[in-house]
Structures are given as C-alpha cells and as structure tokens.
Amino acid sequence: MKLDRYSMMIVCKYFENEEDYIEVMCVCKKFQGITKQFHYNPIPISSFSLFPNIETQYLYEDGEEVLNGIINTVICYKVSYKIYKQKKCNNCKWLNICYERSDRENRTTEIPKEVCSLGFGCFEQTLLEQLVIPNTIKKIQSYCFYSNRFLTSIQLSTNLTILQNDCFKGCIALKSIILPLKLQIIEKGCFSYCTSLTSIKIPSQVYFLGDDCFSFCSSLKEVILPNTLTYIPINCFNECISLKKIDLPMSIQKLNDRSFRKCFNLITIQLPFTINTIKSSCFESCTNLLKIDLPSCLTYLDVYSFFNCMSLHSIHFNTTSLKSIKNSTFSNCSSLHSIDLPNGIIELEENSFENCCKLSSIHFPSSLTHIQSNCFLQCTSLNQHSFPVTIQLDDCVFGI
C-alpha cells in the first residue's frame, strides 16, 4: 500500500529525531518538503531549518529555548503545580502538571483542575478520610496515599490509566474502591496491607499487575480478574487470609512465587488448562484447600508449591508434560491418602512428599527413573508401592 502525503505526516509524528525526517524526504519525490506542512514541531528543535512554518512550538524538555517569533508554546515535560503558577501565561499550554506534596498549601485536599497527575507521596500519611480525584488526573505516582490510616473512601478519576508503586499501601481503613475502566497498570504493592479491603474488581483493560499488589489484605474475600492478564505476579495475594473466591481467567499461563501463600480460607480454586508454570510456594500453607486439579498444559511445578496444605486430600494430574516433582512440593500435606503420578514424571526430588502421614497408596509411572533421598520421609502409612524395575533409589528414600 502506498502512502499519500497526509498519511505520511501521520507516520512522521512518531519519528524520534531529525535524521528520520530527512530520510523520509529522500525516499520519494512526493515527500520532499513534507516538514514544511507541519504547524508544530513533533520533535525538539533549536532552529526553524527543518520545520520552517511552525506556528506553535512544543517544548519537550526543561531548558529548551523558545525560538524567536514564536507566540504559542506547549509545555510537554513534567512541572509542579507551583512552577506552573509562577510561569503560566495566556499563550502557553501545559500538558504535564503534577500536583506535588509541596504544592499542598495549608495542607488542603482540593486538587486543582489544571493538574493531570498526583506526585510521589503527595498525600502520604495524612489524616484524610475521604477524597474525590478530578477526572483530569491520568496518573497517581508512587506512595501517593501511603499509610493514610483514616482513609475510608476515595473516588478515582475516570481517566486514570496507571497506579504506581505502593499508591495505597497501608490504607488500613479503606474498605472498598472502584477502579476506573481506563486503568491499564497497577504497579508493585499498590494495595498491600489494605487490611479492611473486602473485594476488588480489576477492570478489563488492566494488562499489568505488579508484585505484592494485594499482599496482606487480610479482609479480602473476593477478587475478579480480567482476561487481559497472562500471569499472577509474585506475592500478589500472599497472606490474604480471608480470600474465599477467585476465578482465574483462561488467559493466565503462570502463577508466580507465593501468589496465594497462606490464603487460609481458600477451599477450592479452578486452575485453567492454559497454566504451564506454578512457581515456588504458590499455594504454601493454604491450610483449607481440599483438592487441586493440575492443568493439562502444566510443564513446571516448583519447590514448596503446595507445602503444608494440610487439608489437601486429592491431587489430580491432567498433564503428561511434567518431568519432576520438586523439593518439598507436597510436604506436610497430611490429609493426602493416595496419589497417581502421571506418565512423563522422571524424577521425585528430596522431601517431595515428606510428612504426608496419611499417604497409603502411590502409583509410580513407568517413566520414573529416580527417587531422591527423604522423598517419603515420615510417610508412616505408606504400605502399597511398586517401583518400576529401571528406577534408581537414593539412600533413605523413606527416611530409614
């Protein structure tokens, strides 16, 4: 498909340096002089040589000089609200005004309409109880509402697209929050230690959750996740001790380290067949988890994945792609009675089933070649086992 001059101008808006514009004008005769059609500069400039007909100059970095003869300017770089008030003028437009902690004169909670982001720690450790964030706000930066111990209610901007690290961490009185539909990114620790938060619905456009997002939310009972996520991050729901219900979307492929560790009230969870990796301690000490169906796409089950799941009495392997049971994967699963290991398993590592004291029956697949020491340590009820003839047994497999 051939581009006309207008279409090429649209493409040119995404160029990053002068060389890109010069090259495109050399590609084809019809693109010669295309930069003369721009009425603003899409990249930083120091002269009119490349864009001779601009009427408005965009300034992309602090310190750029306004060219002689330019009347209208647009400030693209971030400035504080205080700087904006000092330098604002009729012919200047400001695109990135950030409301900083130092801008809050007399500790006011009113957010000016010109502001488009809330700065680092802007409302950190205040006595704030309620707040309405205007719809001009698109970003809330790290620690903005960190440890607001009295914050019970907050209405977020409908145009918000990103919540940065630890935004609401430690807001122990916050019981509920409605996340806007345009939200795309929730960074590390954003709602960790929000101990009164009872439920959360992640909007459908969110494609990134950071580590520790909801860790230690001890009252969190229900979570709704979008099908835009491909993994559950590290410590995401770690020690959400009240969590009872969570539906994992079919888009999820990986459960990271300690994703659901110590979710004491989690009785059951449906793992979609798309999951191929479960990382270390993912469900460690989920002491009320009753059964688990491991998905057909699973290829990696890490150490301590189900360690100390004391109520777990049923494990169903739907996969034949799993090559090993890692160290202490099912240790302390004291309610487990029997297990049928799938074909494809080659090795059982140290302490894989240690202290599964009710385990009385286990089926070993013909693919199994190696069982490491202490694999069945303290499995005092194990009395039915037949090993493939090709198997290598390390010393003290049964702790004897």
Image (cartoon, rainbow, N blue to C red):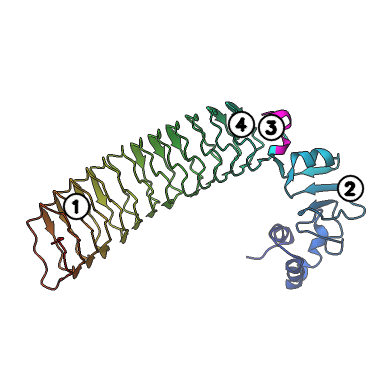
Check whether the beta carbons of the residues at disc 2 and disc 1 lie within 8 A of each other.
Answer: no
Q: Amino acid at mark 2?
A: Ile
**Is 257 placed left or right of 327 in the picture?**
right
Question: Residue 111 bears which disc, if any?
Answer: 3
Instruction: Tell me which residue sits at (63%, 35%) in the image.
Output: 123
Quarter of the image for residue 159 reads: top right
Which amino acid, mark 1?
Answer: Asn
Q: Is residue 173 above or below residue 237?
A: above
Q: How many marks?
A: 4
| Residue in front for this viewpoint, 102 or 234 | 102
* Residue 53: x %, y % from top left: 86, 57
* Residue under label 4: 126
Tag in front: 2 or 3: 3
- Depth-wise, is mark 1 or mark 3 nearer the camera? 1
Q: Position of residue 353 (x, y in %)?
A: 20, 56
Q: Residue at x 81, y 60 (%)?
A: 45
Q: CA distance from mark 1 to mark 3?
A: 58 Å
Q: Position of residue 91 (x, y in %)?
A: 86, 42
Instruction: Answer with mark 2 or mark 3, whichever residue precedes in sequence.
Output: 2
The answer to whether residue 139 is seen in the rendering is yes
- Residue 88 seen: no
User: What amino acid does circle 3 point to?
Assistant: Ile
From the image, tell me which residue sits under label 2. 71
At 86% from the left and 64% from the top, the residue drawn is: 49
Q: Nearer the viewer, mark 4 or mark 2?
A: 4
Q: Is residue 37 above or below residue 158?
A: below
Q: Please give the range of residues in magenta.
A: 102-111
Q: Nearer the viewer, mark 2 or mark 1?
A: 1
Residue that mark 1 sits on: 355
Evaluate if marks 2 and 3 touch, with contact meaning CB atoms under 8 Å apart: no
Name above or below for residue 11 compared with residue 286.
Answer: below
